[in-house]
Amino acid sequence: MAGRLPFHILVDVFFAARDGNEVEAFDHGGRLTNLKWDSMESAATLTLVCKAWKDAAVFALHRSISILGGEAASIFLDTLRAHPERAAFTRSMVCGLDFADERACETERALRSSAKVLQALEACPLISHLQIRPLHPSLRLRVVDAIRTKPLTALVYLPRFDTPVLPPHREMDLRDLVGPKLEGLEVELWADSAAPIPSSTPSSILLHSTFPPLALRDLRVFCPGADGLVLALVSAAGNTLHSLDVYIETVYKDPSVVASALLPSAHTLQRLKYLTCPSLADLAEFYDPKAPQVFDLVLPHLTKLVELVISATEVSPEVFRSIDFRLEEVDLHDEAWRPQDVRELGAALARRGTTLHYTPD
């Protein structure tokens, strides 16, 4: 009976059989919830159940793959040489070096492994979801070309270590990789992996000189030392963003710079996480608890917002009294507020059906 099931039903059986609970963020899909996808490795044993399932099983198992290291890439490339049609089955891929080589991605061994991994990426023309890890610096241009040729809707840069995901070349430009059809982007870039936009640049230039208009719905950016890049991405996404997760290490002297980047998404944002970790010196010099903070200017306009995770240094208690929409959850981080303010806000939000979580960092 099972052998007579239609092909698409058998494929659905394999997709349903995978164990997504075993897949970690570093293996597939990244950390931003709406970008996650799973590998199919846990369903591989089902190929042994029935010979009539083989074609559907092969199709499903190639749909979402993980190529980590030169050995894995070689096995995959050998398979494609024997069955070249399978290259078109893959829609989701995680590719990078294995654990040891990723820590030292500029060695000769890492170069050989990187070349094989890159071949695997280049061989699959229809990838729509890609997570890429650090590869050897000498392959940077080929990596960019390989990414640009894919019909990507989701792109994830997520290293396991504090190393740039693309090697630390100043000429690397994220504009080469973020296409107009991209809906989900997650990126971790450290200070030496992209030329930061100086925070002294006027906001009108800062927000519009880096990216063309984008159609991003889901964006997560973790970019210590390149905070201007964060604002440029957020601003370019305009009125399409539904989910935004930001981590920066800057206290802005002029909160309107950040507000200008966020306001174009005011009527679409539903989930927002905005955490900062400035140095104590920056806090002492720039943070004024009596002055309007970034989200004093922005929060009243985020009328579709459902979930908010925010550093207490970026918002004042009073602004929550001025909003006329109902948040479902507020998660407040660090100790910038007085305990009395936290208790009073918790009580006020509870009366409106909003749950407050407080995390003293």
Image (cartoon, helix red, strand yellow):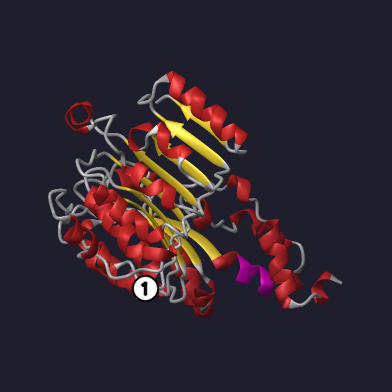
Which residue range is magenta in the image?
Answer: 55-60
Q: Residue furthest top?
A: 339
Residue type, numbered disc 1: Pro
Relative to the observer, which residue lies in front, 310 or 102?
310
The 10 Å Cα crowd at callout 1, few under 14, some 14 to 19, many 20 or more, is few
* Residue pictured at 39% horizontal, 68% vertical: 121
Q: Residue at x 60, y 38 (%)?
A: 352
Q: Could you tell me residue 266's position as x and y percent? A: 42, 57
Based on the picture, tell me whether residue 56 belongs to the magenta stretch: yes
Name the magenta segment's main secondary structure. helix
Q: Quadrant of the N terminus?
A: bottom right
State whether residue 283 is above or below residue 44: above
* 203 with respect to 272 (left or right): left
Q: Position of residue 330 (x, y in %)?
A: 51, 38
The quarter of the picture where residue 89 lies is: bottom right
Q: Is residue 106 visible?
A: no
**Residue corresponding to mark 1:** 180
Can the viewer see residue 312 in this picture? yes
Left or right for 229, reference 46? left
Q: Nearer the viewer, residue 220 or 162?
A: 220
